[in-house]
């Protein structure tokens, strides 16, 4: 099953070569995802990819994504003039959260990236000081890179040039990530749990409790007042 496409063009040039600068960013609408999007030089080259419901949040381990994260990814893509949004179809192997290994999610993102004409995939998983999670993420990226080198069938032709897989914020802790977000002028009110409907869900409450104090403290250290109660994108 192919991903549902929102505003993504898979057009190719007259020479048959896809857009050489298009980057797929795995996005759950959270802080790590938005930071990764803003790290890409050209916003219109960003294609956000919403993982299937039930996948683990990128910057909040143990908490599953749901329809609020998908809606946030779409809203962010539209409001911030990114190049489009891809939504992964549901997967039966994601209940309970964590059942599907990280490399499975990343591999599916790479398949959709290739179909959309992307040349790289940004996986903004945030591990901080969790050395085990960081090692797992790095191994997942290596595994997916090796899988891309295999022919589709035994004895078949070698695949096309493999996608570059990056982990732009993997070793950042919460304060580092918040610092970088302010450096990049990331619109914090666009975060998924700032939407009123999402903010009152158990996952939204958990995200707010985990991130709002960090963002407030980092902003205060710079003499900036951040209103965590302000309503985000609806």
Image: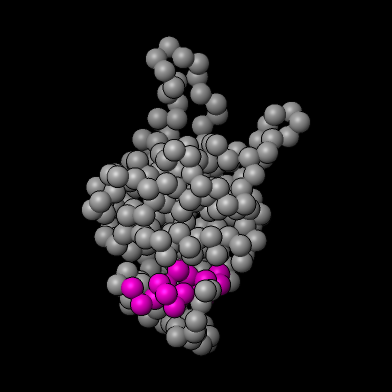
Q: How is the image coloured?
A: one colour
Against 158, is 229 above or below?
Answer: below
Expressed as whole percent of the image width and height from the top left, the position of residue 224 reads 53, 85
Q: Nearer the viewer, residue 11 or 121?
A: 11
Q: Could one spot residue 172 in this view of the protein? A: no
In this view, the residue farthest toward the right is: 14
On the rendered structure, is 63 left or right of 76? left
Q: What segment is highlighted magenta in the picture?
A: 186-201
Q: Residue at x 53, y 74 (%)?
A: 233
Expressed as whole percent of the image width and height from the top left, the position of residue 4 reads 51, 47
Expressed as whole percent of the image width and height from the top left, the position of residue 63 reads 29, 62
Does the magenta-highlighted stretch encompass residue 142?
no
Viewport quadrant of the N terminus:
top left
Expressed as whole percent of the image width and height from the top left, the position of residue 176 reads 43, 67
Query: Residue 79 lies in what quarter of the image?
Result: bottom right
Query: Residue 58 lies in what quarter of the image?
Result: bottom left
Is most of the magenta stretch helix, strand or loop? helix
Q: Nearer the viewer, residue 108 or 163?
A: 108
Q: Nearer the viewer, residue 176 or 214?
A: 214
């Amino acid at each position: 099953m192919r991903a549902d496409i929102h505003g993504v063009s898979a057009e190719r040039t007259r020479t048959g070569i896809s857009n050489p600068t298009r980057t797929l960013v795995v996005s759950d609408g959270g802080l790590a995802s938005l930071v990764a999007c803003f790290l890409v030089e050209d916003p219109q080259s960003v294609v956000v990819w919403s993982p299937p419901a039930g996948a683990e949040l990128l910057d909040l381990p143990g908490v599953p994504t749901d329809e609020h994260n998908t809606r946030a990814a779409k809203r962010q893509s539209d409001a911030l003039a990114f190049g489009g949004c891809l939504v992964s179809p549901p997967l039966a192997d994601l209940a309970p959260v964590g059942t599907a290994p990280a490399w499975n999610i990343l591999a599916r993102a790479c398949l959709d990236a290739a179909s959309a004409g992307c040349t790289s995939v940004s996986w903004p998983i945030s591990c901080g000081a969790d050395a085990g999670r960081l090692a797992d993420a790095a191994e997942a990226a290596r595994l997916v890179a090796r899988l891309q080198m295999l022919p589709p069938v035994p004895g078949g032709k070698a695949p096309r040039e493999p996608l570059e897989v990056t982990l732009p914020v993997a070793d950042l802790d919460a304060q580092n990530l918040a610092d970088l977000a302010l450096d990049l002028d990331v619109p914090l009110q666009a975060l998924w749990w700032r939407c009123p409907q999402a903010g009152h869900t158990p996952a939204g409450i958990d995200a707010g409790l985990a991130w709002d104090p960090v963002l407030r403290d980092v902003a205060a250290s710079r003499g900036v007042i951040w209103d965590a109660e302000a309503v985000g994108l609806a």
